[in-house]
């Protein structure tokens, strides 16, 4: 495992529970869209805590790194990142790790991305890399969040979908029914079947990321919609 001490250059609140942390890396990090890094904290008494976080930035900007971290009340790392860390602080980062849950636009494989909550983060790396390389490979993102305020990167994703005919963005809210213009309800078999039926070019890869219950439901829905299990990759957090 390669470790480096990276300076926090900026902190951007994205939702009531999530912030993006931007790091300047002393050594460029070679990674693939969908991989994560480890954030390691060391207490004055030597105690260490570390957690893995998906990379939101694209590999094309490898000397800077964006990690989006949700604050978990019982977490060892996220409360410190949210409540203590400030721009200028140095944080240990290790990695990259994870070779299974990756997708690169250079492969030319149309993709269906299904994310719940902060499960959208690795998809941001994928979509940003796609934009950076000028790729036109078709991509559909289905994103579920509790409320409108929890739809991370919503403006960026909406802008991308409106400016690129090969990108489809579907957002649904699970705990807010009054937000105009949004679907409501969870990502289930019926919604996935509808999305699959409307896709112009069938996806060769289906990537699902979110909490354990979310991934289970979405995977079952994808299979029910006729997607072969060999095409499905999953990533779970909070387990």
Image (cartoon, helix red, strand yellow):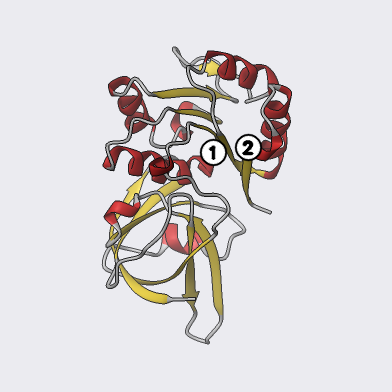
In the figure, is residue 167 to the left or right of 70? left
In contact (CB < 8 Å): disc 1 and disc 2: no
* Structural distance between the alpha carbons of marks 1 and 2: 22 Å
- Splitting the image into 4 quarters, where does residue 206 fall? top right
- Splitting the image into 4 quarters, where does residue 163 fall? top left
- The local crowd at label 2, few if under 14, some if 14 to 19, many if 20 or more residues have their Cα within 10 Å, is few
Q: For the point 32% across and 48% down, which residue is it?
A: 12
Tell me the element at label 1.
helix
Residue 117 - label: 1
Q: For the point 46% across and 32% down, which residue is it?
A: 151
Q: Position of residue 107 (x, y in %)?
A: 43, 42
Q: Closest to the observer: 148 or 154?
A: 154
Q: For the point 72% across and 37% down, which residue is it?
A: 216
Q: Closest to the observer: 138 or 58?
A: 138
Q: Position of residue 173 (x, y in %)?
A: 55, 24
- The local crowd at label 1, few if under 14, some if 14 to 19, many if 20 or more residues have their Cα within 10 Å, is many
Q: Position of residue 202 (x, y in %)?
A: 54, 23
Q: Earlier in the sequence, mark 1 or mark 2?
A: 1
Q: Position of residue 197 (x, y in %)?
A: 58, 14
Q: Which residue is mark 2?
A: 231
Q: For the point 73% across and 31% down, which residue is it?
A: 220
Count all numbered tags in the image, as a single digit. 2
């Amino acid at each position: 495992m390669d470790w480096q001490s990276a300076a926090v250059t900026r902190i951007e609140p994205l939702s009531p529970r999530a912030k993006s942390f931007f790091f300047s890396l002393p050594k460029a990090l070679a990674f693939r869209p969908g991989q994560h890094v480890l954030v390691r904290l060391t207490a004055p008494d030597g105690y260490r805590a570390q957690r893995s976080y998906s990379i939101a930035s694209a590999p094309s900007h490898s000397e800077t790194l964006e990690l989006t971290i949700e604050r978990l009340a019982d977490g060892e790392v996220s409360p410190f990142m949210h409540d203590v860390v400030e721009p200028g602080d140095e944080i240990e980062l290790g990695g990259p790790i994870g070779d299974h849950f990756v997708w690169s636009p250079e492969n030319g494989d149309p993709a269906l991305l299904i994310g719940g909550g902060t499960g959208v983060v690795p998809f941001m790396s994928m979509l940003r890399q796609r934009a950076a390389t000028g790729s036109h490979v078709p991509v559909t993102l289905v994103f579920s969040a509790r409320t409108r305020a929890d739809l991370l990167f919503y403006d960026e994703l909406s802008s991308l979908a409106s400016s690129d005919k090969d990108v489809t963005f579907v957002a649904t809210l699970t705990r807010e029914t009054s937000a105009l213009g949004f679907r409501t309800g969870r990502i289930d078999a019926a919604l996935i079947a509808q999305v699959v039926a409307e896709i112009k070019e069938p996806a060769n890869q289906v990537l699902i990321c979110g909490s354990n219950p979310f991934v289970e439901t979405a995977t079952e829905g994808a299979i029910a919609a006729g997607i072969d299990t060999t095409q499905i990759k999953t990533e779970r957090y909070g387990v």
